[in-house]
Image: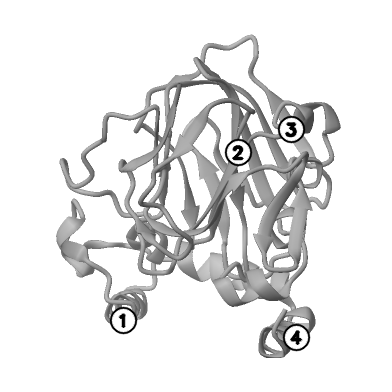
Amino acid sequence: MPCSDRFAVLPQYLLPKHMLTRLAGRFADAQCGWLTRSAIQRFAARYAVNMSEAAQADLTQYATFNDFFTRELRSGARPLASASLISPVDGAISQFGRIEGEQIFQAKGHAYTTTALLGGDAALAAEFRDGHFATLYLSPRDYHRIHMPCDGRLLRMIHVPGSLFSVNPTTARGVPGLFARNERVVCVFESAHGLFALVLVGATIVGSMATVWHGRVNPPRCGQLREWRYGEQEIRLAQGQEMGRFLLGSTVVAVFPAGDLRFNPDWAPARAIRMGEVMAEIA
């Protein structure tokens, strides 16, 4: 790890990350009139947010910052490719590839285990031994809804408490086991290709994460692992359908079982991606 990355992340160890996140979440939910409108306009300008793709392109029509941040796209803005797996988000590729045993590559010199990522559930992690993963980073300017990479039936959801480091590329290079130590929501599905999981990873200032079947998962932040099981319910989501969203952005880690999965040959770390494009084909 370069010394510059190590020093860049040192202040994050000292910041009161949970307190800052609570305050940011309260503001993002509040209807503060001109203050909210000003914050939205400044944010959109600073990060060059493309509002022409939004169903509501007028920034002044958003009552809260979270309404703006989780904005819906206009119909047809993200056509779905014909593929076994499509990208579930807009963003950038952090890393992707094969899971070596249960080791997931994070950045040079850093890896973490599927057991740690999935909240300590070794039996669940075993389903993905020697499987495949994709870590997808959503920057502030991106569309922040998460969609299904393929058809799936929901089995479980696990809220894993943790830290709230930033998840930007510098922090990924500087904080060991970042995606397995930050707060996260693990969503487990079964599909025609076997089990897969979408892990929504929280970060500093990420006020909360939500799913379409549950609503907001956090807060509350009780400091204990929480789990919901849906095996007796028929919650099915189609490929491309929204499954959740970040209220202020973060990262998604997708994990798939071992098998003949071939990632899009155009994919590479740091490459920009759009929801609906080809992620992988499964034989």
Q: Position of residue 114 (x, y in %)?
A: 75, 42
* CB contact under 8 Å: marks 1 and 4: no
Q: Which residue is mark 1?
A: 38
Q: Is residue 195 left or right of residue 261?
A: right
**Would residue 21 be seen by someone viewing this image from the given angle?**
yes
Q: Residue at x 72, y 59 (%)?
A: 182
Please identify, in this view, whether the residue under mark 1 or under mark 4 is nearer the observer: 4
Mark 3 touches mark 4? (CB < 8 Å): no
Q: Are marks 2 and 3 in contact (CB under 8 Å)?
A: no
* Sequence-first disc among 3 and 1: 1
* Kind of residue at badge 1: Ser
Task: Indicate the quadrant containing the N terminus: top left, top right, bottom left or bottom right.
Answer: bottom right
The span from disc 2 to disc 1 (Cα, nearest Å) is 43 Å
Q: Earlier in the sequence, mark 3 or mark 4?
A: 4
Q: Nearer the viewer, residue 218 or 79?
A: 79
Quickly name the residue at label 4: 10
Above or below residue 75? Residue 282 is above
Distance from the alpha carbon under mark 2 to that under mark 3: 9 Å
**Left or right of 47: which side holds 100?**
right
Give me the disc on residue 129. 3
Determine whether, in the image, residue 37 is placed left or right of residue 193.
left
**Mark 3 and mark 1: Cα distance apart in space:** 48 Å
Frontmost residue, 137 versus 280: 280
**Mark drawn on residue 173:** none
SS at circle 4: helix
